[in-house]
Structure formats: structure tokens, C-alpha cells
């Protein structure tokens, strides 16, 4: 017989809830969405930039601090050593200034630092030119009233600097035929880019050009006087918009001697006035000699 004083023990079994799975999947999903947003933003930026801007970005991030050398191997630089000649530009920089690496090596130098200056100056000038092109295009885009003239404004980099050409194209002329007085739309374009030109450090050169006369035709006006007069008219508009006179190095008329299309010098796009932002060398460091 059981002892009535013995305590009765009742064991209750509680069912444990399932363990929480955590929020790791949420973090992974957020990272995925962020990566996709960054990818599409990058694609959009690439589609909106011009070829000159892409080249400028490539030049900015191009490594130029190391030059290939056979000295050393297995070290921190993995067989690449710092050359005594200094920084060497990459291939795109040589192509941008129209020279090759062999040409740079062939240049005579008066001292050990001269080669450094000859290498760094074109690279710095290229960056300045890319910035100038971007600034000029932005100035034109900020004026919707001249948006229909985009085909008549050609901005490009050349060996001399940056050319801003007002070109007869798309059935629209920038000057009346045979006249040195520009249309009002031409004046608007020049006044739109004048503030940007005033901020840039480059010296300016203005040249007028015309198309060649077709065989058998007779020109009504002298092409030399016509192109010179148009170049002078452009300089006067820019000067009136705030550019100092000492910023201009030359104002010339080229007649039909420098056609834009060598294979067809008779077409209207050869008629143009070109404003050239001349390359400017950066100042030399103290104690350096050219």
C-alpha cells in the first residue's frame, strides 16, 4: 500500500517552438538589389557619356606610375621595377597626342628631368582639353533655344588643341551667302560659349574657311576676304561678350585651302569658322629649364 505522505510528481512536457531562421537571407537580398541598382546606374552613365568623356575617364584611371623592366622578380612589384626615366604614359596617351613611345625616347634631353617634363606635359594638356570639351558642350546644352543647331556645332580635339567649328550643315548656314555678318542664331551660339571660353586658360585662334568653287563656276566674292571677314566678325562677338583682346593669338582667313572633307571640297560643311583653344603647357617647377 502506497504511503499517503509521498508527494505526487507531475511531469509536464512543453513543446519547443521552431528556432528562428534569422535574417541572413534579407541581407543577401538587399546586397543583390543594391548590386543591380549599381549595375543599371553604371550602364546608364556609360550610355550618356560621349566618346571623349570615356577616353578622359580611361586616361584618369590608367596606371602610369610603373614602367616595365626586367630587373627584379618575385618581389612586391612582381618583376616590375620603377624606371629611372620616371613615369611613362600608357599607349592611349601616346595615341592621343599623335606620338609613339619610340618618338618620346628619341627626343633629346638636356638633363635627367627634361624627359619627365616632356612626358607629363601632354598628359596634363589632354586632361585640360577633355575638361574644356565637356564644359563647352554643357554650355550649349544649357540653351534649349539653340538645340536645333547641334549639327552645326562641331567640337573636337586636335593636335593644336580643341576646335569649336560653326559649320554649314543640314540645310542651315551660319552666315548669309557672300556676307561677313552672321545670322542671329550664330551670334546666340557664340554668346553661349563665351563665358566658358573666358573661364578657360587657353589662348584662342580664329580661322575662317569656305568651300571650293566647282569647276566651271565663278565665285561672286573673294574667298580670302570673305573668310577673313567672317573670322573677324566672330572675334568681335566674342570680345563683346567679355573675352579680352589678349586672349586671341591670330584671326585669319584660309579661303578654300583647308577643306574639312578632302575628298569633296565643294560641299557646304567645308564652309565654317573655327575657334581653336590652343594647347597650353603647364608651368615649369621652380629651378627647371626648358
Image (cartoon, rainbow, N blue to C red):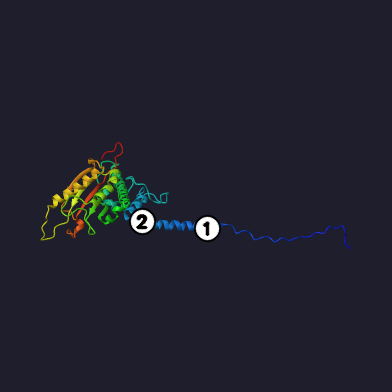
Q: Which residue is drawn at 33% across and 53% down?
A: 53
User: Residue lying farthest right?
Assistant: 1
The percent coordinates of residue 14 (x first, y second) are 71, 60
The percent coordinates of residue 263 (x first, y second) are 19, 60
Of badges 1 and 2, the one in the foreground is 2
Whether residue 91 can be seen here: no
User: Residue lying farthest top?
Assistant: 287
- Crowd band around label 1 with a 10 angstrom C-alpha radius: few (<14), some (14–19), many (20+): few
User: Residue lying farthest bottom?
Assistant: 1
Q: Marks 1/2: CA distance?
A: 30 Å
Q: Which of marks 1 and 2 is nearer the N terminus?
A: 1
Q: Nearer the viewer, residue 44 or 102?
A: 44
- The N terminus lies in quadrant: bottom right
- Crowd band around label 2 with a 10 angstrom C-alpha radius: few (<14), some (14–19), many (20+): few
Left or right, 17 with reference to 137: right
Disc 1: which residue: 28
Q: Determine whether the residue tagged by mark 2 lies in a helix, strand or loop.
A: helix
Q: Quadrant of residue 152?
A: bottom left
Disc 2: which residue: 48
Tell me, for residue 262, which label it has, or none: none
The percent coordinates of residue 240 (x first, y second) are 24, 43
Amino acid at each position: 500500500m502506497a504511503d499517503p505522505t509521498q508527494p505526487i510528481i507531475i511531469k509536464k512536457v512543453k513543446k519547443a517552438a521552431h528556432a528562428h531562421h534569422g535574417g541572413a537571407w534579407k541581407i543577401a537580398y538587399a546586397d543583390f538589389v543594391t548590386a543591380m541598382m549599381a549595375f543599371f546606374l553604371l550602364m546608364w552613365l556609360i550610355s550618356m557619356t560621349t566618346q571623349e568623356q570615356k577616353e578622359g575617364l580611361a586616361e584618369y584611371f590608367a596606371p602610369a606610375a610603373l614602367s616595365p623592366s626586367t630587373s627584379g622578380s618575385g618581389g612586391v612589384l612582381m618583376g616590375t621595377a620603377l624606371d629611372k626615366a620616371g613615369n611613362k604614359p600608357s599607349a592611349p596617351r601616346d595615341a592621343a597626342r599623335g606620338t609613339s613611345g619610340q618618338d618620346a625616347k628619341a627626343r633629346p634631353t638636356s638633363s635627367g628631368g627634361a624627359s619627365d617634363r616632356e612626358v607629363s606635359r601632354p598628359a596634363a594638356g589632354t586632361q585640360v582639353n577633355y575638361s574644356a570639351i565637356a564644359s563647352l558642350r554643357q554650355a550649349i546644352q544649357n540653351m534649349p533655344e539653340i538645340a536645333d543647331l547641334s549639327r552645326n556645332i562641331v567640337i573636337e580635339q586636335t593636335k593644336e588643341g580643341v576646335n569649336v567649328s560653326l559649320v554649314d550643315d543640314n540645310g542651315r548656314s551660319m552666315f548669309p551667302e557672300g556676307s561677313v555678318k552672321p545670322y542671329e542664331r550664330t551670334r546666340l551660339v557664340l554668346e553661349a560659349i563665351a563665358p566658358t571660353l573666358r573661364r578657360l586658360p587657353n589662348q584662342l585662334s580664329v580661322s575662317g574657311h569656305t568651300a571650293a568653287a566647282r569647276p566651271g563656276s565663278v565665285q561672286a566674292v573673294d574667298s580670302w576676304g570673305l573668310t577673313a571677314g567672317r573670322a573677324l566678325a566672330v572675334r568681335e562677338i566674342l570680345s563683346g561678350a567679355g573675352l579680352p583682346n589678349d586672349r586671341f593669338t591670330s584671326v585669319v582667313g584660309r579661303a578654300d585651302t583647308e577643306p574639312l572633307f578632302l575628298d569633296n571640297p565643294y560641299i557646304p560643311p567645308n564652309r565654317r569658322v573655327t575657334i581653336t583653344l590652343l594647347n597650353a603647357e603647364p608651368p615649369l617647377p621652380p629651378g627647371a629649364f626648358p
